[in-house]
Image (cartoon, rainbow, N blue to C red):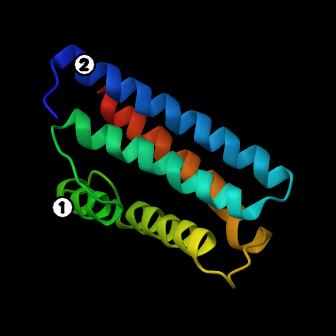
Amino acid sequence: MTLSIDERKAVVAYRLQKAQNAINEARETAKLGYWHTAANRLYYACFYAVTALLLKNGLQANTHSGVISVLGQNFVNKGIISKEENRLYGNLFELRHSGDYDDWKILDEKDVLHYIQPAEDLIKKIETIINK
């Protein structure tokens, strides 16, 4: 996808807004005890932020695993995103995937709740990097 500078800025801003919306959805659905939905929204909140970061830097990936790989190669290996933050993102991917696709996986509070604040922190960090 070839975008002008203004179009790229608009898409980056849109994805960051989607990240904020999704983290709010995660927080609210967790309050209601919808753990599968909360896990899904946590992952997608971070996914939207990460893809905004990639786009801002002229990078892209075609799969969710590809996004993880491109993030690692371009931001984790350079020390911009920590290994712990990258592990968080990977864990959220796995949690979302098993919650969405594993028929017998039942997510509960202990699986999800501890990820909310770290996911919020990662999104804030990505926003800071983008806005530099």
Q: Where residue 1 sits in the image (x, y, percent)?
A: 17, 35
Where is mark 1, residue-wise? Answer: 73
User: In which image quadrant can residue 116 be found?
Assistant: bottom right
Where is mark 2, residue-wise? Answer: 7
> Depth check: 12 or 116 in front?
12
Q: Amino acid at mark 2?
A: Glu
Q: Where residue 3 sits in the image (x, y, percent)?
A: 17, 24
Residue at image position (17%, 44%) is: 59
How many other residues sit within 10 Å of disc 2, few (<14), some (14-19) or many (≥20)? Answer: few
Residue at image position (34%, 29%) is: 12
Residue at image position (50%, 73%) is: 94
Relative to 68, 110 lies left or right = right
SS of the residue under disc 1: helix
Residue at image position (33%, 44%) is: 51
> Depth check: 7 or 115 in front?
7
Q: Nearer the viewer, mark 1 or mark 2?
A: 2
